Amino acid sequence: MRFIFLPEDSLQSPLENRHQTMVISVIADVADIPKATNVNEFDYQRYQAQNGIMNDLKITRFTVIANAQATTPVQWWQNACHGVRAWMIRLSNQLPKTLRLYVQGLFLGYRADNFYDELKSVTDLGLIHLFSISGFHVYWVIGLFSAILNGCRVPRRVAIWLLMLALPHYYLMAGAAPSLLRAILVAFLGLIAEAGHRSWTPLTVFGISLLVGLGCHPASWSRWGGS
């Protein structure tokens, strides 16, 4: 289900100051995603179906019932990561406009309403997509935390384990996109190889990440050609 808030300002503003996972009641219209009108048009309906999205849900009114209560450790972990992501998005709102859009779009997987209008030249060139699909942001985050841990004189073996523990958290906090999963897996396998003093070929790393990625998102094969 794809959610569309109408009108955006009046509905999204009450959510801006919340960072917990919530249970909400909504009044909405369910509609089919438009099909391609001719053979040469991009089939947006098919594309969304590959993501498991079959309908549009146009929300006109909602009521927050309560904060969601986790019933399992996994749910608590997921809710905590989403809460941190919401907090980081609010924190990044204090950055200058262009930098804010870059940080939120690339490192947090969040597209503001004015993203495509403000960064038209960037979106036309596909730079955000290029950086995302290449895993640039994942390696940048790993490099940053590696430098911090090295500055704190943390032994490299301990730092590797801390980074491997941090990667699944970052996967959720950055939007959990299929392309991000591929980048996370490649970085994770690189850390495993370093911890085990092994040297894997790029083809081996890509093959393992591809198999795991297909197990999680079978339709991702059709979107990984450029990666």
Image (cartoon, helix red, strand yellow):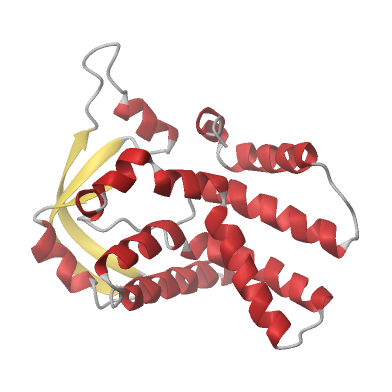
**For residue 108, which quarter of the picture?**
bottom left
| The one of 29 and 115 positioned closer to us in this rendering | 115
Q: Position of residue 112 (x, y in %)?
A: 26, 58
What residue lies at 76% left-to-right and 84% top-to-bottom? Answer: 154
148 over 104 or under it: above or below: below
186 over 126 or under it: above or below: below
Q: Position of residue 11 (x, y in %)?
A: 13, 63
**For residue 91, which quarter of the picture?**
bottom left
What residue lies at 28% left-to-right and 73% top-to-bottom? Answer: 93
Could you tell whether 118 is left or right of 187 in the image? left
Q: Position of residue 62 (x, y in %)?
A: 16, 62
17 over 110 or under it: above or below: below
Could you tell whether 90 is left or right of 148 in the image? left
190 over 52 or under it: above or below: below
| The one of 204 and 22 positioned closer to us in this rendering | 204
What residue lies at 68% left-to-right and 73% top-to-bottom? Answer: 146
Could you tell whether 104 is left or right of 179 in the image? left
Q: Is residue 68 visible?
A: no
Question: What is the quadrant of the N terminus in the image?
Answer: top left
Q: How many marks?
A: 0
Name the residue furthest bottom. 152
Q: Position of residue 31 (x, y in %)?
A: 19, 36
Q: Is residue 105 visible?
A: yes
Name the residue furthest right. 197
What residue lies at 8% left-to-right and 55% top-to-bottom? Answer: 7
**For residue 19, which quarter of the picture?**
bottom left
Question: What is the quadrant of the C terminus in the image?
Answer: top right
